[in-house]
Image (tube, rainbow, N blue to C red):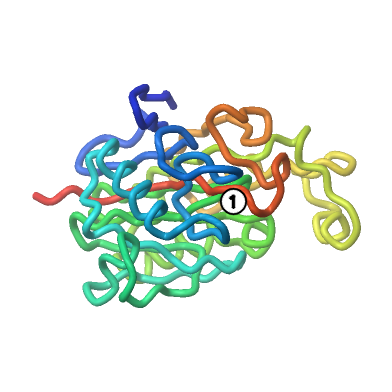
Amino acid sequence: MQLREGSVPILVSRALPPPFGHAFTTRIGGVSTGICSSLNVANRDGDPRENVYENRRRACAAAEANGARLTSANQVMGAGVVRVTSDMIGNAAGPGRPIPRADALITNEPDVPLLTYSADCCLTLIADPVRRAVASVHASRAGAHAQILRAAVDAMAHEFQSAPADLIAIVGPTLCAKCHELDGAELDKWRGSPHLEGRHLDLESAVAAQLESAGVGTMDRSGRCTRCDGVHFFSHRRDGEATGRFGGLIWVRPL
């Protein structure tokens, strides 16, 4: 995975060829200020929505995505999957459209960028080059524990007849194990997991293992820590809940 420099830098993977477009945004190149500075792509208290929409427009321009059809979810830290259909398209660039409550979006609609966003959780992009379908997944700690990656792969198989072996998954930046210390109920929940060492959870490895167990054929992992890299990424663990969010975008290019 490589960082494509520019006024709005994006992280891209060589593992995901045409007919797909994709990007992980960074925190650089937007108009937001304060703790959300500068390319915050999620609605946050204290950051005017006009800023968020402009940031999304800039992110789409940098990724060469159709911003007018950008579609996002109302994320709830769960494992719900929603298929984006024609009546949902375009809710992310401005108000007035329904926003599904889910943490994974799937679609086979062409030219519809799917956006999920994070400030430490593991964004994962999935593509099926055979069925021309995609998924954008927000794998929070709770979502990963509830098997959201498996749910997304199963949903693509059900809705689009995707064969897991055909799928390509791109695992984005998230907290590294050193930075991801658990306590209390969260620690108890993950006890016994091979991805927990002492009090430290390796969320990227947990996500990758889930994709592997689901039979996903190809995977690329970022290996970047959101807390360690304060230049490029927002981090809840480093800066608090009020901080901004970076995004994961994926879409099927039109024929």
Total labels drawn: 1
Please report the residue visible at 26 percent of the width from the left and 65 percent of the height from the top. Answer: 90
Query: Secondary structure under badge 1?
Result: helix
Please report the residue visible at 41 percent of the width from the left and 53 percent of the height from the top. Answer: 52
Please report the residue visible at 40 percent of the width from the left and 73 percent of the height from the top. Answer: 99
**Badge 1, how many Cα within 10 Å: few under 14, some, many 20+?**
some
- The x, y position of residue 229, in whole percent, is 62, 28
- The x, y position of residue 184, in whole percent, is 90, 58
- The x, y position of residue 25, in whole percent, is 43, 39
* Residue farthest toward the left in the current orientation of the protein: 255
Apparent side of residue 136 relative to residue 119 in the rendered image (left or right): left
Give whichever of 89, 155 is nearer the camera: 89
Give whichever of 159, 233 is nearer the camera: 233
Apparent side of residue 204 relative to residue 56 in the rendered image (left or right): right
Q: In which quadrant is the N terminus drawn?
A: top left
Q: Which residue is mark 1?
A: 210
Give whichever of 71, 151 is nearer the camera: 71
Residue kind at label 1, given as amino acid type? Gln
User: Where on the picture, by quarter, is residue 113?
Assistant: bottom left
- The x, y position of residue 95, in whole percent, is 33, 70
Apparent side of residue 76 relative to residue 61 in the rendered image (left or right): right
User: Where on the picture, by quarter, is residue 131?
Assistant: bottom left
In the image, residue 79 above or below residue 180: below
